[in-house]
Amino acid sequence: MTPLITTAIVVLLVLITMARANRAPDFIIWGGVALLMVAPVEQSDGGYAIGLLSAADALSGLANEGLLTIAALFIVAAGVRETGALHLLAGRLLVAPSSERAAQHRIVWPTALMSSVFNNTPLVALLLPVADDWARRYRISQSRLLLPLSYASILGGACTLIGTSTHLIANGWLIQSAGLTGLGIFELTPFMLPIAGCGLIFVIVCSRWALPARKRAFPDLGNAREYVVEMQIEDRSSLSGQTVDEAGLRGLPGLFLIEIERSGEVIPAVSGNVRLAAGDHLIFAGVVDSVVDLQRFEGLTLATDQVFKLDAKRANRRLLEAVVSNSCPLIGRTIRAGQFRTVYNAAVIAVARNGTRIRGKVGDIRLLPGDVLLLEARPNFLEQQRNRRDFYLVSEIESASPMARERAPIALLLVAGMIAASGSGLVSIYTASLLAALITVASGCCSASVARRAIDWEVVLVIGGALALGKAMENSGLSSLLGGTIAALVGSSPTATLAALFLASAVLAGVVTAKASVVLMLPVALAIADHLNLALMPLVVIVMLASATAVATPIGYPTNLMVMGPGGYRFSDYLRLGGPLTLFIGGLGVLLVPLFWPLS
C-alpha cells in the first residue's frame, strides 16, 4: 500500500478505537505509532520499505516545547495544591450563597479568571473538592455547579496561551512544524475574551433548563464510626462574627457540632443562628472525611497544641488511624496526662469509641482498649508501630496530608512571576514554566517525589503520540488530501472555510479528545491555506478555538470527565448544554477571527 493509504487506515483505526474502546488513549495512540513504524509501504520506484515513521520522527513529539511546558505546569500546580493556596483564595470567595444562581456566579467567574493564568486541567483538579465540599455544606445540587465549573475553566483557559494545553500544543506546532515565531501569552486574549464572556452567560442562563438538579445520594451514616474532634477559631478568622449556618459548619454530611466552649462557659445543643467568635473552641462529632474537611476551613485550626509541637514539618506529616490495644501503656489515662505526643511523637486529633458519642475535649478523654485514634504523625510512624503491641492496627488516610500553608504566598508568587516573565517577553513560556517548576521544588512548596507524581504521564504520552501521527499525516500527503477535499467542498468562501474547519475540529475533539484534535487538524489547516491561498493564522486560531472549547461530550476535555462522577452527570447532559454552546462559540469565532487575523 502507498504511504497515504497506510496512514489513512492507521489514523482511522486509532480514531475508531479511541471512540469505542475503554482502553487508555495513550496505549491506543502509541499502538498506531508503532504500526506506522513497522508497516511495509510502497516506494516511488515500486519497491517496499519498512515503516513510514522513523524512530526520530516518532519520538520528536516528546521534545515539543508545548508538551514540556505542560509537564512543568503540572509541577507548578502541585506546589499550589500542596500549600493550600487555592483553598485560601476559594475560602474568601465561596461564602454562603443567597440562591443557586448566585452560587453559579461565585463558581463560574473566579474559575474562569484563575484558569486564564493557570492551566485548566490541574486547576479543576484543585477546585473540584473545594466546590464539592461547598455544595455539600450549603446543600446545593452538585449537578448545577460542577459542569459549569468545568465549562468556566475551559472558556477561561482558552483566553491565554498557558490556560489550556491545546494552545500550548498548537504553539509548539507553529514553532516546530510551521516555522513561525509562536504566540505571545496574551495574544489570543482580545479575541477570546468576548467569546468566553458570552459563553459563560450562556451557561449560567441555560443551565437551569439544560441541567437536571440531581442531588447526589448521601450515604447512610447511621452506623459510621464517629470521631470527636476539637477545633478553635483563630484570632483573625473570617468565621468570627458569622453564624454557624453562615460558616457552613452544619452542612457537612456526617458531622455534628456538639458544643461550643467560650471563655470557660459551655454552649450545648448549638443552634444554627449562634454567632461565632475568635477563640471559640468547637467540639464536633463526625466521620473521618468530615473531620478532614474541617481542617480545610480557613481560620479554623485544631485546638490541641500538641500538633504544633511535633518535630516534623507539617507538610511532612501524615494523617493516620490507629486502634488502641489492651496492652497500650496509656490505657485508663487521659491523652493529656499520658503525654501521648511525647511517648509516640504523634498528636491525637480525634477519638472514636464503639459508636458512642464522647463528650468533652480531646485531651481530657481517657483511653480505653478499642478506641480508634485519628493521628497526625511522621511518615515513619507506620514502620515504628508495625511490630509493637500498643496498637492493633495502623493505617494511613489517603489524600489527607496536611498542607504547608506557610508557603502558600511563595506558590502564588511563583505563578505570578511566571506569567509576568513570559507575558513581558523577557523569556519564553517554556523557559518561565521550567524555572517556576524548579523553584517550586527548591522552595519546598512540594517535594521532588510529589512533583514526579504530579505530572500526568498519560496526557504527556497522548500528546507525544498524537504529534507523531500528525507528522505521519504530513509526510504521507494525507493532510494535503484532507485539506484539498475540504477546500473543494466549501468553495472559495473564507467564512464557509472557517465554519467547516471549526465543525470538523469540534466533532473530532468531542470524539477523540481535544489534544488529538488540535494535533491532527493543524496540518489539515496548513493544507487548506495552501489550496485556497489563505493566511495560515486565522485557520490555526479557529482549530485552536474548536479544540480548546470541547464542551459537547465528556470525552472531549479532561475536566468534563473529572466532574462527571461527582456531579452525577449522564452523557446526554453534556449534549443538552454543551452542544448548543459549541455552536454558539463557533458562530462567534467565525465572525470574530477575520477582525483580528486577516484571511488574505
Image (cartoon, rainbow, N blue to C red):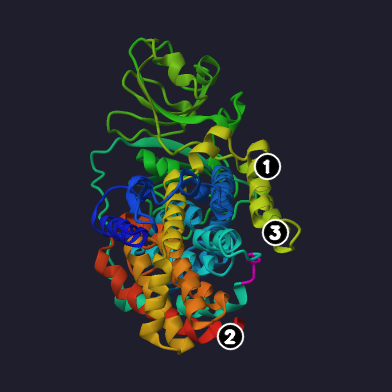
Q: Earlier in the sequence, mark 2 or mark 1?
A: 1
Identify residue for label 2. Answer: 600
Q: CA–CA distance between discs 2 and 3?
A: 30 Å
Select label 2 or label 3 by which is in front. 2
Q: Is residue 202 magenta?
A: no
Where residue 360 sits in the image (x, y, percent)?
43, 34
Q: Position of residue 368 (x, y in %)?
A: 35, 19
Disc nearer the start of the sequence (3/1): 3
Q: CA distance from mark 3 to mark 1?
A: 16 Å
Return the residue nearer the eye: 271 or 367: 367
- Among numbered discs 2 and 3, the one appearing first in the sequence: 3
Vertical placement of residue 15 versus 30, above or below: below
Question: Which numbered marker is on residue 34?
Answer: none
- SS at badge 2: loop
Q: Which residue is mark 1?
A: 439
Tell me which segment is drawn in magenta.
182-187
Check disc 1 and give the amino acid type: Ile
Q: Quadrant of the N terminus?
A: bottom left
Residue 183 sits inside the magenta stretch = yes
Q: In the picture provided, is 485 more to the left or to the right than 384?
A: left
Label 1 crowding class (10 Å Cα cut-off): few <14, some 14-19, many 20+?
A: some
In which quadrant is the C terminus drawn? bottom right
Q: Residue at x 53, y 73 (%)?
A: 541
Whole-percent x and y of residue 256? 37, 46
Which residue ends up furthest to the right in the rendered image? 426
Tell whether label 3 touches label 2 (CB within 8 Å): no
Q: Position of residue 409 (x, y in %)?
A: 67, 48
Q: Residues within 10 Å of mark 2 (few under 14, many from 20)?
A: few
- Label 1 secondary element: helix
